[in-house]
Amino acid sequence: MSSPTESALRELPSSRPSQHLGVDSQLQRNISYLGKHQFAPASPEQQQRGAPDLTKITLNKLLGRSRTKPRPPATLKQLETQLNEFFRVNQLNIAVSETTSIRKILAIVCIANGKELEACCHLIASHANCLRQQIFLRHLKSKLRADIIKQPMVLNLDPNHLDVDNRCSITSSKTVMSTVKKLPSEWYVVQVTAVHEPLKDSRHRIQNEEYSYLLKPTHGLHLVVIPTGENAIDPICITVPKPDGDSSYDLRTEIEKLLNNNKSDLTAVYCNKDLYWKMRKKQNDQMSIAIQELECSWLKEWKILFQADYIDNLDLVQDIHSMIDKLIADDNTSRKTISQRTRWLLKKIATSAWYLKSFEIERAVKYVLPTQKKLAKNIILSIIAKNKVIEPLKDAKRKVLLLILDECLDHISFESMQLLKHQPVTRFPSLHILYALFEQHKSSIKNGYKIVHHSDNIGTFIVNPSLDLMHMETRIRSFLNHWLPKWEGLYGIKPDIEFFKKALMQHEILMYNGHGSGVQFMKGEDIERMRVIASVLLFGCSSLKLLPVGGRQAPYGVSYQYLMACSPCILGMLWEVTDGDIDRMTAEFMSKWIPSKVKKPWSDVDKVSWNRGLIEYTNKDKKLTRTIIENEQDMLLAVAISKDVCKQFMTSAAIVMRGLPIKLVD
């Protein structure tokens, strides 16, 4: 039986298939229309005021019901059929931008049809299409070399886990649950996808001298929570609209302006130090305001979806969950109609209430329960009344957050949100890459962490290979000699390819302190051909930045090449940073994460003396009585805590991780 929406629409007249990519002309017109409009569902308040739902308006126009431009109407089912036919006819090597766009369109159609699981699967398939094809092609090249010239084949990410043939063998609506149930239950996965945008706007421009951003305005977002583990429920999708248009301030444009000017601001010549520090303060304020706007104006109450499930204070969490269950059970009119999805969202709102204002709690609950007004009121009042009881959860430990970001959002520091302060967070370009990397390392993953066993010479380093960062070399040399004296590496020497390969393939940790990401010494193409064992720490400017490559291709970076080579984890910077600030964070992080045989913690070292290359303790204890030093085994958590020593917010916000959670054990 057709839905009321479909029954109200007349049938689409048949049309001859187009020769362009196997898509008929009606579908091309539909896609063209979607390319001109941004849309998001109406909020509960707008619905109560009778405001139109932008998703319905967009779909009505897409299906031929526009009053301003008559067009033969179609049903949602027929539109979905045409879009799926596109992928059936073009199973491999179709244009990346078209693939991403049509997946996002299909997601909107599925949401309108009430097919949330299918919508989530299409959004998952919209991520990292270019990267997944590149991994597939790299695999083919390696196989050809093995077959033709008998070169040993390097086994990296398995293309069978990447769905490059558009059949979505591991992430379709029929298979995605079996895939995510194989992932550790200790993970909490959230995918952030930009809503569909015109293909003409998806082109990535390259400037003559600088890689710059396009100053795109803020848009809507699809937030997809992907539960993992044996007891995982279906993925949940919430679409948030772009911020209200009343203000002239656009946070994405402001962030991109700031980042476009960052390098020139830092390298400019200033008449005096006061002008320089005023510039740094202005940068910090601009980025801080933008991150606040990200939480308050863009994500609004749905920022709580970024809060991973608790692993501490579980008794309190269970009490809150029981309260929600009891309120639902006591409501005779609703208890039989409340879905598992609705319960999950209500419990997430309740356990995250310590971070929400009362009106945000009300707005979120009414969104989840749009028609059950009595139940919604009871739940809102109960959550607000328990707010003080819930507050201890603010400092409770949480699961690891694995953040899957749309490539056009990768330059935004979601990790800097106050909600994620001191929380373990890592990034992935897509669920496919996450799953493929997990499969490569699963034998060494325990309780959600890849286990790395510590030894005195576990790592190596490359410091100041360009010989123009002498102050940085002085600081890092004195730290390594003091904290990790058994480590061997290079100071002030350009590494040859053999040293670089040995560092990546024979050590568990490679620390690089120099300009950029080190690709000036070893090409990314060479990294792709390797099987990298090391977790790579790139403390150079823009070392994890995704660079535009031109045309409609997605941005690309060396961190992707390390992931292709199966490196378990990569740390780096999203933009340019200054050496003094990042050196402080480097020493703090390394001393917090990696054990040492020294007698005093790094916090006792006088940092003024260290800046000159001297190790002196603030507490002049001549006997140097050994103090018990507690290290943080969780690499992600050690990074999050170590950001506190950065004096500049721009520095701490630039630091991100990609890859698997790592735990260093004795």
Image: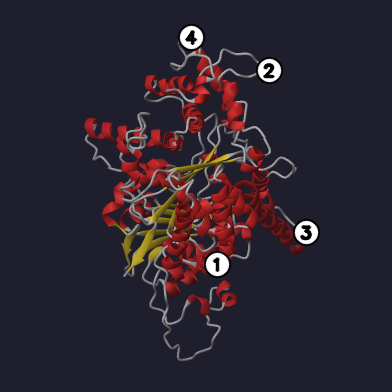
Residue marked by disc 3? 271
Q: Amino acid at mark 4?
A: Ser
Q: Earlier in the sequence, mark 1 or mark 4?
A: 4
Which residue is the site of mark 2? Answer: 68
Q: Amino acid at mark 3?
A: Cys
Counting residues from the N terminus, which is met first, the one under dot 4 or under dot 2? 4
Q: State the residue position of label 1.
A: 391
Q: CA distance from mark 1 to mark 3?
A: 49 Å
Between disc 2 and disc 1, whose residue precedes?
2
Point out the tag, 1 or 3, that comes first from the N-terminus.
3
Select label 3 or label 2 by which is in front.
2
Query: Viewer-nearest of labels 4 and 2?
Result: 2
Q: Which amino acid type corresponds to the residue marked 2 in the rendered image?
A: Thr
Q: Dot 1 lies on which element?
A: helix
Say if mark 4 contacts mark 2, CB within 8 Å.
no
Q: Position of residue 135 (x, y in %)?
A: 37, 37
Mark pair 3, 2: CA separation? 59 Å
